[in-house]
Image: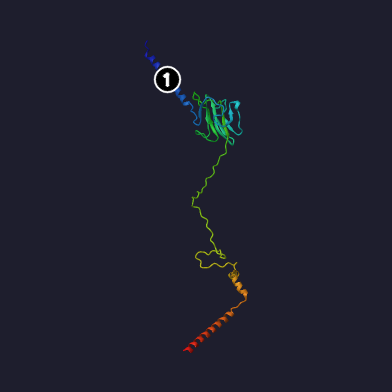
Amino acid sequence: MSLSPRTRLRSMAVATLTLGLVMGANSVAAATGAEEDPRAEVHEGNVTRCDAFGGGLLVSVGDEDQVENLPGLTFEGGDTASAEYVAVTSVPEGIAVTAIVVKGGPGYNVYVPGERGLTSEAPWEDLRSPVNPGGKIPTISHWFVCGAEALPPTTEPAEPTTEPEEPGQSEQPTEPEETEPGASTSSVPSGSMSAPEPSASAPANTLTAVAGKENPAADDLASTGLSSGWLIGVGAALVVGGGALLALTRLRRRSTT
């Protein structure tokens, strides 16, 4: 049975319209599909504890068995009945957050402060669960924060700025110059023609007094009481005797001639 030309045209129009509707629907679905959050690491399945993320459970919402609110930690959103996003706005001082876990649909997102573009300190906003198979962001089923007490920063000792001296380059101590007893220790500037003044503590007759004390022979001579007059008399007698002997010799020679 052959179709009339009008029937063929109707069939082609219906087929074209159907194909257009299908392609349009796919295009709309692709245009409205959500993308994954690049700040989060996507995991399949379920998780309720912080064992794999370090630290203990600070806040857990959606699981009544593990609710443990930490005083001072504040957040916005995160309602497990209708919310798709949660924001952690502040963390108590002395607490270091190690991970924020948001569960929804068949998987969960793990946010680590300071990694994958997430800021290292609060606030952390627009946290959510992974995209579901339908290309939509599911409602949060539960979420929790993992953390621990922050350790105080350690400071390394400053390195010395002065370099150690090499062997043999250290300054040698100068030995003091020996001075004679009684010599003045005051120095005269280079190029000066004036002699140093004598020490005021030494009297002018010091050498005379010392010589008299250290020469015992002089004390002995002074204590004998002898004078040099008798020596002059002996010398004169020798001179007279010599002259008389010479004259006697000459008279003898004349008498023999």
Q: Residue furthest front?
A: 256
Please give left or right for residue 24 compared with residue 239 in the image: left
**175 and 222: which one is in front?**
222
Please give left or right for residue 43 compared with residue 11 in the image: right
Q: Give the vertical position of 166 relative to 126 (above or below).
A: below
Residue 216: x %, y % from top left: 60, 70
Residue 45: x %, y % from top left: 52, 24
Element type where label 1 sits in the image: helix
Residue under label 1, please give it. 19
Residue 29: x %, y % from top left: 47, 24
Quadrant position of residue 100: top right
Q: Residue furthest top?
A: 1
- The residue lying at 45 percent from left, 23 percent from top is 26
Q: Tell me the colour scheme of the image.
A: rainbow
- The residue lying at 50 percent from left, 87 percent from top is 252
Quadrant where the N terminus sits is top left
Residue 188: x %, y % from top left: 53, 65
- The residue lying at 41 percent from left, 18 percent from top is 15
Quadrant position of residue 219: bottom right
Under mark 1, the amino acid is Leu
Q: Give the vertical position of 104 relative to 223 (above or below).
A: above
**247 and 211: which one is in front?**
247
